[in-house]
Amino acid sequence: MAALNYKHLRYFWMVAKSGSIARACEQLHLTPQAISGQLRELEDALGVELFRRAGRGLELTDAGRRILSYAEEIFALGEELLEVARDQTTRQTLRFTVGIADSVPKSVAHRLVEPALRLPESVRLVCREGRLTGLLADLAVHRIDMVIADRPMPSNLNVRGYDHLLGESDLTVFAAAALIETLSGDFPALLHGAPFLMPGDDVAIRSRLEQWFEARRLHPHIVGEFDDSALLKSFGQAGAGLFVAPTAIAAYVTDQYRVRAVGRIDSIAEQLFAITTERRLSHPAIVAIIQVARNEVFGNPTRPPGVSSPSGPQGPTETSPAPSRGRSRLARRKS
């Protein structure tokens, strides 16, 4: 295959963005014949069809959509290069791109990533959100520096990477005050038949939560399933159902969403991992994130108001609200 002609790629990018050759001609100050000819040359060089006719217009083929994603990144980097050339002060800026799996609570993700902006050097933070498999694919080709996920890297993926355990926290069940007034009995029995907002299938704790319900013969009324934890909490705030969140952020959840803790599930721990391509961490932003996660976010979790977690001879037990000192576990793995 011949070397990629970036001028042809730019014409393709402009046509794809504007939606038609005619509009691209206005921006590029070229004739339709010139652009059409150079698009054909690009298709011949790549060996794929980039557009197909759709009525009087054009639409991207599957191959065209894939190539467009690369073109977007290429020309975004080109714009960044120009910015650096224009402003010498940006020469010292450290770019840090982090991928955050959909299943990671947004409030936790913010607390984990924010330390990257407090480094002595200037950092340009880029956050990407999506499904774990897609983020790991970008990690493998170094489009992302680190992925934050609620599970280790799947063993069936052909991606070389390393898991760094950030920490873990057990779960607290929350509900709006109006909903709590309709419930009867003690925790966890009060969950039986109560409206419940379940994490989506992509969330690691989903299956463990279902097993916990089954083991206790509890059958809450599942009124919704959510991959996005922030959206789930918003529905919980509106009184649509009870929901779980990590105990480590219980104070934030009660303050931000104006809900109350109902009980605590000690036997289920939500874990968070930083996945990188390097075993020994060298990127200053990654090092800062892991230190803060272990020392602050999970190391000193905040106790939810009025929820206890006593441990007897038979281990941790699920408890009802009662004044007591909270406890959270932190598992550390040497990175």
Image: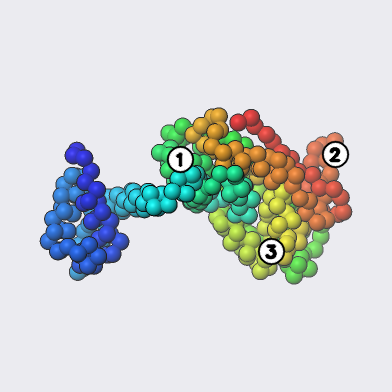
Pointers 3 and 2 in contact (C-beta within 8 Å): no
* Residue kind at label 3, given as amino acid type: Tyr
Q: Which of pointers 2 and 1 indicates the residue nearer the eye?
A: 1
Badge 2 or badge 1: first in the primary sequence = 1
Query: Residue tagged by mark 1?
Result: 139
Q: Is residue 140 visible?
A: yes
Label ID, residue 257:
3
Question: Does dot 1 land on a helix, a strand or a loop?
Answer: helix
Q: Quadrant of residue 187?
A: bottom right
Q: Residue at x 76, y 61 (%)?
A: 260
Pointers 1 and 3 in contact (C-beta within 8 Å): no
Pointers 2 and 1 in contact (C-beta within 8 Å): no
Badge 1 or badge 3: first in the primary sequence = 1
| Image quarter (top left, top right, bottom left or bottom right) of the C terminus | top right
* Residue kind at label 1, given as amino acid type: Leu
- Above or below: residue 16 compared with residue 212: below
Q: Position of residue 108 (x, y in %)?
A: 63, 51
Q: Position of residue 319 (x, y in %)?
A: 81, 50
Query: Residue tagged by mark 2?
Result: 312
Question: Does dot 2 land on a helix, a strand or a loop?
Answer: strand
Q: Residue at x 66, y 63 (%)?
A: 236
Q: Position of residue 8 (x, y in %)?
A: 21, 51
- Above or below: residue 270 compared with residue 218: above
Q: Gap between marks 1 and 3, in whole Å?
A: 34 Å
